[in-house]
């Protein structure tokens, strides 16, 4: 038992941090109906702010903690509440896009200010031994962290049951008008919830950085995934159970690291505990217990295309095709041609993501994980002497199995929980799979191009052929009976069921097709440079890709051109690293705006203003002024 005690103790301490983070996440979700994917980025921002005030500016840690937790976090909560209000009348897919855009913007801002390199975070709580259990010393720091977690869980439970504001928070999402009739302002209740939730995120970020003794924006952002697993045990509703879930995840992680540490193929599996808990929870929790909070909103259909004469359209297509064909020979391309080749490989990934998100209304935050699996399948097949074309096909096909696995939650759950499952899967593949011999291993995985295509210009046209074929396939699917079913699935799954059509089959098929195309994209990307490694498929790229997809338009051809150019070609022309990070910030910010405006919020606002102005002009004062009469107030003046 003494061998396991240290791991249990560390697990309880780490789990307390996970529980605090999860309670803040569940609290804001319960009171706003917006699941904040960027919750981990708020944790990271708070930890970096504390680091700046304490270690860079020299403030005493109590002062730095008070400024971050009691000033910075509440301000962040108020801003997040405004964002939640703006996102409340949009469909779930766009709520996810908005919070993903916020995560990308916050993470990129942190990278711009502090760089991506990890920093030493000096622990600030006393680490003296308080007492021993089974010959294991329990430090004061560990007691304080566990005490904060338990106190927070008990305090929130009593707050929701015994206080008027707590009761109001439970009803603000379901019926804000009824709450308003009781004398409680819904806006004030929501603001209070977001402020408290942000304070919890702030505390968890600081404590997590202290226990790890390091600052890393990616590690801190991942804290939200640990919160996913903890929140699953609380069924995304119960705050005390979310804290208990944090303890379960933390202990399982640390005990798991002890159990699998000596087994090569199980190493890293302990890091995947939150995803495993999340995935199992999504499968076994009754469906009626996982109903999304807030109102159900249907997407506004895409605007009808402009009526353009067939001849004009054909001329435009011909001019665009000629331009694309001539790219390798243009003077402004030159040494930037590899970036165009890389963009062509990602055309396939973006149209596959477009098919899933735009057409069927489902969402994926793990498409670069599919691309990584496809790249590894392709490279391993090449190493075994398989011809290039067949190896690319196999790279796509090996993604069908994980796509089928991920499609299981899609059969029974809504877009929100599917997004959580896909994000968790993407991180699971990165943390567990990338280092294994069946994927990249710990070095570079050799790949290559087909014979005769060593020249970048020749290879450009081969990649262009793959990209055009993928776009044609997606367009064919969208215009087929299956495409109509997918659009119906996005608008009203219930209506499809009443017509006797199988919603589940459509969901599984679209996920498998999308995963296959993403795998082909990864295979072609692996072929570009002769070798590929895990740094080519960082999990955060899946989130950036969704943000870029959101700002690239609603049409398949538009997405196929704009999204890869924005993500790969434009940064290649920017030599300043800070400017490239600023470009990523702009992706996040524009994605937020796109999500908010997905239901025509800006147009409605302008229309409302026009109506008000028209009424003012038509009023008595406007009539008198039009007739040359001065209002009495002005005459007296």
Image: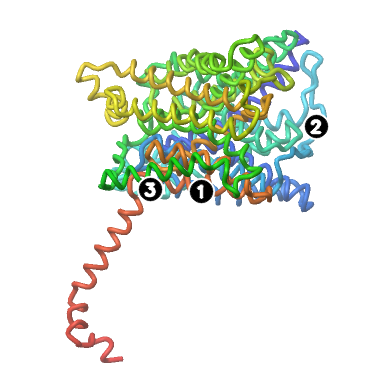
* Left-right relation of 58 to 373: right
Comparing marks 2 and 1, which lies closer to the viewer?
1
Q: Residue at x 19, y 82 (%)?
A: 626
User: Percent from the top left, x then y, of residue 48?
Assistant: 68, 44
Above-or-below relation of 408 to 493:
above
Residue at mark 2 to residue at mark 3: CA–CA distance: 50 Å
The residue to which callout 2 is attached is: 127
Circle 3 sits in a helix, a strand or a loop, which is it? helix
The answer to which quarter of the image holds residue 284 is top left
The residue to which callout 3 is attached is: 597
Circle 1 sits in a helix, a strand or a loop, which is it? helix
The dot on residue 589 is 1
* Left-right relation of 5 to 574: right
Task: Answer whether residue 290 is visible to the viewer in this image.
Answer: yes
Residue at mark 1 to residue at mark 3: CA–CA distance: 12 Å
Total number of numbered labels? 3
Residue toward you, 150 or 111: 111
- Counting other residues with Cα less than 10 Å from the Cα at mark 1, is it few (<14), some (14-19), or many (20 or more)? many
Precedes in sequence: disc 2 or disc 3 = 2
Residue toward you, 199 or 604: 604
Residue toward you, 320 or 236: 320
User: Percent from the top left, x then y, of residue 214?
Assistant: 75, 35
User: Percent from the top left, x then y, of residue 150?
Assistant: 60, 29
Comparing marks 2 and 3, which lies closer to the viewer?
3
Residue at mark 2 to residue at mark 1: CA–CA distance: 41 Å
Q: Residue at x 68, y 51 (%)?
A: 576
């Amino acid at each position: 038992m003494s061998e396991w005690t240290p791991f249990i103790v560390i697990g309880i301490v780490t789990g307390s941090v996970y529980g605090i983070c999860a309670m803040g996440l569940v609290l804001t979700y319960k009171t706003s109906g917006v699941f904040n994917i960027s919750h981990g980025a708020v944790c990271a921002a708070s930890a970096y702010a504390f680091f700046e005030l304490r270690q860079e500016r020299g403030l005493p840690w109590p002062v730095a903690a008070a400024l971050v937790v009691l000033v910075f976090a509440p301000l962040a909560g108020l801003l997040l509440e405004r964002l939640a209000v703006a996102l409340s009348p949009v469909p779930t897919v766009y709520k996810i896009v908005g919070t993903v855009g916020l995560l990308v913007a916050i993470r990129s801002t942190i990278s711009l200010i502090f760089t991506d390199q990890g920093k030493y975070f000096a622990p600030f709580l006393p680490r003296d031994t308080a007492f021993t259990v089974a010959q294991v010393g329990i430090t004061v720091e560990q007691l304080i962290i566990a005490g904060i977690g338990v106190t927070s869980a008990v305090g929130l439970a009593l707050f929701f049951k015994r206080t008027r504001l707590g009761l109001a928070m439970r009803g603000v999402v379901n019926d804000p008008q009824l709450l308003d009739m009781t004398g409680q302002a819904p806006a004030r209740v929501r603001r209070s919830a977001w402020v408290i939730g942000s304070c919890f995120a702030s505390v968890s970020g600081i404590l997590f950085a202290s226990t790890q003794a390091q600052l890393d924006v990616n590690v801190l952002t991942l804290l939200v995934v640990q919160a996913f697993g903890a929140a699953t045990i609380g069924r995304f509703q119960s705050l005390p159970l979310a804290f208990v879930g944090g303890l379960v995840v933390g202990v399982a992680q640390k005990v798991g690291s002890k159990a699998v540490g000596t087994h090569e193929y199980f190493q890293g599996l302990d890091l995947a505990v939150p995803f495993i808990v999340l995935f199992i929870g999504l499968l076994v929790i009754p469906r009626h217990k996982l109903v999304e909070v807030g109102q159900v909103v249907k997407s506004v259909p895409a605007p009808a295309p402009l009526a353009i004469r067939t001849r004009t359209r054909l001329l435009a297509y011909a001019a665009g095709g000629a331009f694309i064909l001539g790219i390798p020979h243009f003077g402004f391309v030159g040494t930037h041609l590899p970036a165009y080749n890389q963009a062509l490989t990602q055309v396939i990934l973006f149209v596959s993501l477009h098919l899933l998100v735009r057409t069927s209304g489902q969402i994926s935050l793990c498409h670069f994980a599919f691309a990584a699996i496809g790249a590894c399948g392709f490279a391993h097949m090449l190493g075994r002497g398989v011809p290039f074309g067949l190896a690319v096909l196999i790279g796509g096909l090996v993604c069908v199995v994980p796509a089928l696995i991920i499609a299981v939650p899609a059969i029974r759950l809504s877009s929100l929980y599917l997004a959580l499952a896909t994000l968790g899967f993407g991180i699971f593949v990165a943390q567990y799979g990338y280092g294994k011999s069946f994927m990249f291993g710990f070095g570079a995985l050799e790949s290559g191009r087909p014979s005769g295509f060593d020249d970048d210009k020749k290879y450009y046209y081969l990649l262009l052929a793959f990209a055009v074929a993928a776009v044609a396939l997606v367009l064919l699917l969208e215009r087929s009976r299956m495409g109509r079913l997918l659009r119906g699935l996005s608008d009203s799954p219930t209506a499809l069921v009443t017509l006797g059509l199988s919603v589940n089959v459509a969901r599984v098929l679209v996920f498998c097709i999308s995963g296959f195309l993403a795998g082909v994209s990864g295979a072609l990307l692996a072929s570009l440079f002769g070798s590929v490694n895990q740094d080519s498929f960082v999990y955060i790229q899946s989130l950036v890709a969704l943000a870029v997809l959101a700002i690239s338009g609603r049409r398949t051809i538009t997405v196929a051109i704009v999204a890869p150019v924005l993500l790969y070609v434009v940064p290649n022309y920017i030599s300043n690293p800070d400017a490239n990070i600023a470009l990523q910030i702009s992706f996040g910010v524009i994605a937020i705006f796109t999500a908010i405006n997905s239901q025509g919020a800006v147009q409605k606002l302008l229309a409302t203003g026009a109506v008000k102005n028209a009424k003012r002009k038509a009023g008595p004062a406007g009539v008198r002024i039009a007739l040359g009469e001065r209002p009495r107030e002005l005459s007296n003046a």
